Image (cartoon, rainbow, N blue to C red):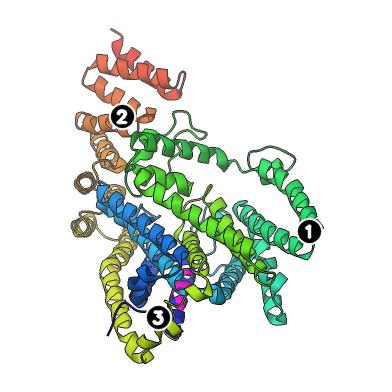
């Protein structure tokens, strides 16, 4: 059997289903029994479906070099280039666990990104212009489901008891911003069916989805979805108006500009709509963005490491932040986050890929006929909506996966019908390779099964480990100290390379007032990740809490580098230096505190301690 071959219509549709189903289930999956009920199960589902899709699409992927469509070749080549950059950046990252599985409660590591790349490539191979209505239906219905759940949360009828500090409309994404973003995007697809569909039922469902979606976006108190929807809707409305009559298009363009300009200005707290649309969190984001730029300038080629933004943030953050002492493990800007963590090695292929897909979508709209113009405008609108979201958001797995899927579909749609025969065994150029669907499906199905098993082997321990953390947290007060310490140390020894789990375990021990176990595990954190904040902070507070301040000094001194604006840390060092009668070091550090933040409380306390000790 020839492995490199075209997919049959049945096989291609099966891959389409797994790509779309993978996207939907990634967005919707939660698992409340896990310590991370949001992103860890999403990563698991995403990687599992990507593995299955990869197995099923391998024959077409191997045939990709023979594609007659240059658009697909270039698109798939750029996806491959991004994957290569990701591979290099991953190997260059100092802490491999974080590089592969991502930051704590984010999981935007290489495994997630490779899964996104696979689904994008699969979509680029199996979706064509004739099958491009199907994804819009799935996206619209996804928005309807999320909107219904969001309304239940808004009404206080959520069946899940979330520990939620945000607006109640977090749906399955854990944050109102992410909910607003994906529902705003899905509403663009719903608007398409409201305008274009000739089926009464389909149009009615889309209208309900659109109405409920916009309601949820507004009630989420997040402007991300508003701007994403406005971008896509504006393109769709403008194109439709222009198609009816040129003067209508010009009028629509002017009207949208008049409406859109105040909205755009409001983002920066300017204009008449600022009081309604401006969100103060933008100032926090400006701090995060500047830190990302600082990281890139210090590590331009390979970045600080895949998803290592959090452990470098305290060092590269600006001195005077909008909220002083604020910490984050993500740049809240997808472009800057990749630039900071992967450097130019990752960022340049990503930029080229996005630019090329944008060009394909724009080109398709320009060359479209009257019948297909609405769909072309919708795909362009959804795509640009995602690019807009990327400026102000975290690459949340449940939202970001759709950028990759839609991007892949745009690549697949760019091939003309006559150039798409690599996918269809029934086309005239592939009749010689046509065999029974049963025979053709054996190898891909086996491949999909093997890859799925590999994913289970890799990812199931992550899920069981997260479940174990929940169990340990639940048993914090019920077990005696000796039994609890035994459980903590056993779990720590089972996860020696996982600094995130180890930090949690050390914290549990400290909460149990078992400082000996806490110290032992915190030192394991330092072995797994020498830069980890907790690898220095936890031993320091343990030694200080047991009146062994001299032993805390090396850890506090390390924090002077990795957490360089933290005057609280400096104050503790002043106390330790004074305890050793090292007045010179204490005085120098007190002067540094005053220089950094003149008149601050920490500066006053440091000066007072020195003056007290200096008195005869």
Q: CA distance from mark 2 to mark 3?
A: 59 Å
User: Residue at left 70%, top 69%?
Assistant: 370
The residue shown at (39%, 29%) is 565
Label 1 – label 3 distance at C-alpha: 43 Å
Comparing 108 with 504, the one in front is: 108
Q: Which residue is mark 2?
A: 560
Range shown magenta: 16-23
Q: Relative to residue 122, is residue 178 depicted above or below? A: above
- Label 2: which secondary element: helix
Query: Between tags 2 and 3, which lies in front?
Result: 3
Name the residue at 55% across, 37% down: 283
Element on which disc 3 rests? loop
In-image side of 495 versus 345 (left or right) = left
Quadrant of the image containing the N terminus: bottom left
- Between disc 1 and disc 2, whose residue precedes? 1
- Magenta stretch secondary structure, dominant: helix
Asked if residue 27 lies in the magenta stretch, the reply is no
Q: Is residue 100 above or below residue 564?
A: below
Q: Residue tagged by mark 1?
A: 246
Residue 581 in sight in this render: yes
Q: Residue at x 43, y 70 (%)?
A: 68
Image coords of residue 30 (percent x, y) = 45, 67
Give x and y (percent) for residue 576.
26, 25
**Residue 294: x, y in percent?**
40, 34
How many other residues sit within 10 Å of disc 2, few (<14), some (14-19) or many (≥20)? some
Query: Which circle marks residue 7 in the picture?
Result: 3
């Amino acid at each position: 059997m020839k492995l490199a071959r075209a997919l049959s219509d049945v096989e291609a549709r099966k891959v389409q289903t797994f790509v779309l189903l993978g996207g939907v289930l990634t967005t919707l999956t939660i698992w409340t029994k896990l310590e991370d009920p949001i992103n860890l199960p999403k990563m698991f589902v995403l990687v599992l479906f990507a593995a299955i899709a990869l197995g099923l699409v391998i024959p077409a992927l191997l045939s990709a070099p023979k594609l007659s469509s240059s658009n697909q070749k270039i698109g798939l080549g750029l996806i491959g280039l991004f994957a290569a950059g990701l591979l290099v950046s991953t190997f260059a990252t100092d802490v491999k666990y974080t590089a592969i599985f991502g930051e704590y409660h984010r999981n935007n590591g290489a495994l997630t990104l490779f899964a996104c790349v696979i689904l994008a490539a699969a979509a680029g191979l199996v979706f064509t212009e004739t099958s491009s209505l199907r994804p819009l239906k799935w996206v619209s219905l996804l928005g309807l489901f999320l909107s219904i759940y969001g309304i239940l949360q808004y009404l206080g009828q959520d069946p899940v008891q979330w520990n939620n500090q945000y607006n109640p409309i977090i749906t399955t994404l854990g944050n109102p911003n992410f909910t607003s973003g994906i529902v705003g995007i899905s509403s663009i697809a719903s608007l398409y069916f409201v305008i274009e569909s000739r089926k009464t039922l389909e149009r009615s469902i889309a209208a309900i989805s659109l109405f409920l979606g916009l309601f949820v976006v507004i009630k989420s108190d997040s402007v991300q979805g508003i701007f994403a929807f406005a971008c896509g809707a504006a393109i769709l409305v403008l194109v439709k108006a222009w198609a009816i009559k040129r003067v209508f298009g010009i009028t629509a363009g002017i009207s949208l500009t008049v409406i859109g300009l105040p909205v755009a200005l409001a983002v920066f707290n300017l204009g008449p709509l600022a009081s309604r649309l401006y969100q103060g969190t933008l100032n926090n984001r400006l701090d995060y963005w500047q830190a990302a730029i600082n990281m890139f300038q210090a590590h331009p080629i390979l970045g600080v490491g895949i998803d290592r933004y959090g452990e470098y943030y305290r060092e590269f953050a600006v001195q005077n932040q909008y909220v002083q002492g604020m910490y984050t493990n993500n740049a809240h800007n997808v472009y800057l986050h990749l630039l900071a963590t992967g450097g130019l090695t990752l960022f340049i292929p990503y930029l080229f890929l996005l630019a090329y897909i944008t060009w394909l979508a724009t080109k398709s709209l320009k060359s479209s006929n009257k019948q297909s113009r609405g769909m072309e405008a919708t795909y362009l609108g959804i795509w640009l909506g995602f690019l807009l979201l990327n400026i102000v958001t975290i690459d949340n797995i449940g939202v970001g996966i759709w950028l990759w899927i839609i991007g892949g579909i745009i690549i697949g749609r760019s091939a003309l019908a006559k150039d798409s025969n690599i996918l269809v065994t029934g086309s005239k150029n592939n009749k010689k390779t046509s065999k029974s669907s049963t025979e053709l499906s054996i190898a891909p199905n086996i491949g999909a099964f093997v890859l799925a098993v590999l994913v289970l082997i890799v990812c199931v321990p992550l899920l069981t480990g997260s479940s174990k953390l929940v169990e340990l947290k639940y048993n914090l007060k019920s077990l005696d100290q000796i039994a609890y310490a035994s459980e903590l140390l056993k779990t720590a020894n089972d996860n020696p390379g996982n600094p995130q789990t180890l930090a949690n375990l050390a914290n549990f021990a400290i909460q149990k007032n078992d400082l000996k176990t806490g110290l032992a595990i915190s030192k394991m954190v330092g072995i797994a990740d020498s830069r980890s904040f907790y690898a220095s902070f936890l031993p320091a507070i343990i030694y200080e809490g047991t009146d062994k301040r001299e032993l805390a000094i090396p850890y506090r001194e390390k924090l002077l580098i990795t957490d360089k604006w933290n005057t609280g840390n400096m104050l503790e060092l002043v106390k330790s230096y004074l305890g050793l009668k090292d007045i010179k070091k204490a005085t120098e550090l007190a002067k540094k505190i005053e220089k950094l933040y003149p008149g601050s409380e920490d500066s006053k306390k440091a000066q007072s301690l020195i003056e007290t000790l200096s008195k005869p």
